[in-house]
Image: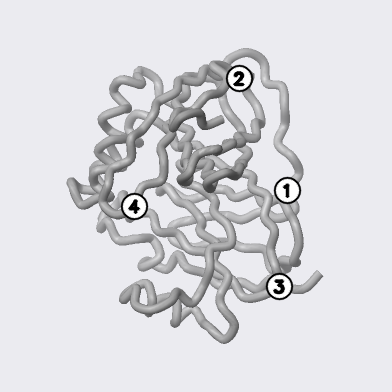
């Protein structure tokens, strides 16, 4: 739960599958990132690295360097976002070890978020297995492998990061008559109303991890997009969408 801008939850969990649900009673959206510390890393060392990522998004520092500094210390298991006066939920499979929940209130413009850091110890015997997914999506460098047959209605998606870089997936529903080219042009100019609405989100994940999300999709034309920066190899810093990670798909009627 989010209480007066801070996150309250269990101090420990057993390994295995967990559905992280954020209940947000605040007046702004609230985001939680789940990280697992690597061997030898500490929460105290992680905090300035996370703050540097936030600063780089506001134009204060190098985004690629900041992300890679965090990834040297921790794996990113996923994100949970809850709108104001609402709940958000994402399922993850946790391994034993020290974890940190980084929570912050949604901000506007170049204001830096005020983060809270909540330790979470995952220990003991594994208890719960992940649910059976209705659809499985693979994220690679730089594309989405989406199912050929996606039907409207409520469904559970398992989204797997099978690439070598961090990825996320923003699902956008195109407005009637709009195309991928319209979305690309709008992203470049950000002029006028957007040609698509966000219809789902699967948060940032490190390679080899997966998240489980419940989606309610209407019939229509959609896009899956990743905006994470190119942070390995040539490390151009370009959004993955500019490297080809923007894929259209159709949701058929029930």
Q: Residues within 10 Å of mark 3 (few under 14, many from 20)?
A: some
Please give the residue where the numbered disc 2 appears in the rendered image. Answer: 13
Please give the residue where the numbered disc 4 appears in the rendered image. Answer: 108
- Describe the element under mark 3 as helix, strand or loop: loop
Q: CA distance from mark 3 to mark 1?
A: 20 Å
- Residue 226's spot in the image, x, y percent? 45, 59
* Residue extending farthest bottom: 177
Mark 3 or 1: in front is 3
Q: Who's the residue at 24% across and 43% down the image?
A: 55
Check the picture and name the quadrant holding the N terminus: top right
Q: Are marks 3 and 1 in contact (CB under 8 Å)?
A: no
Please give the residue where the numbered disc 1 appears in the rendered image. Answer: 133
- Describe the element under mark 1 as helix, strand or loop: loop
Q: Who's the residue at 41% across and 40% down the image?
A: 105
In the image, residue 54 sits, relative to residue 49, either above or below, namely below
Q: Are marks 1 and 2 in contact (CB under 8 Å)?
A: no
Residue 183 in sight from this viewpoint: yes
Sequence-first disc among 1 and 2 = 2
- The number of discs equals 4
Image quadrant in which you'd find residue 131:
top right
Q: Are marks 3 and 4 in contact (CB under 8 Å)?
A: no
Please give the residue where the numbered disc 3 appears in the rendered image. Answer: 219
In this figure, which colouring scheme has been used for the structure? one colour
Q: Who's the residue at 62% across and 41% down the image?
A: 89
Q: From the viewer's perspective, tell me whether residue 99 is left or right of residue 112.
A: right
Check the picture and name the quadrant holding the C terminus: bottom right
């Amino acid at each position: 739960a989010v209480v007066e801008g801070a996150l309250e939850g269990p101090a420990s969990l057993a390994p295995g599958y967990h559905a992280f649900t954020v209940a947000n009673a605040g007046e702004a959206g609230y985001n939680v990132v789940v990280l697992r510390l690597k061997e030898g890393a500490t929460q105290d060392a992680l905090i300035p690295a996370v703050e540097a990522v936030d600063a780089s998004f506001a134009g204060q520092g190098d985004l690629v360097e900041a992300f890679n500094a965090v990834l040297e210390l921790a794996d990113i298991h996923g994100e949970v976002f809850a709108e104001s006066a609402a709940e958000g939920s994402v399922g993850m499979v946790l391994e034993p070890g020290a974890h940190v929940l980084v929570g912050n209130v949604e901000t506007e413009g170049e204001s830096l978020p005020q983060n809270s850091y909540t330790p979470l110890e995952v220990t003991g015997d594994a208890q719960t297995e992940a649910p059976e997914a209705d659809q499985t999506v693979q994220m690679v460098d730089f594309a989405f492998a989406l199912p050929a047959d996606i039907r409207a209605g409520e469904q559970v998606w398992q989204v797997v990061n099978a690439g070598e870089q961090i990825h996320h997936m923003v699902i956008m529903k195109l407005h009637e008559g709009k195309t991928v080219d319209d979305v690309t042009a709008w992203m470049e100019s950000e002029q006028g109303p957007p040609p698509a609405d966000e219809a789902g989100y699967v948060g940032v994940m490190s390679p080899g991890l997966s998240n489980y999300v419940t989606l309610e999709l209407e019939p229509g034309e959609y896009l899956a997009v990743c905006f994470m920066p190119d942070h390995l190899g040539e490390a151009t810093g370009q959004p993955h969408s500019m490297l080809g990670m923007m894929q259209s798909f159709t949701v058929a009627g029930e």
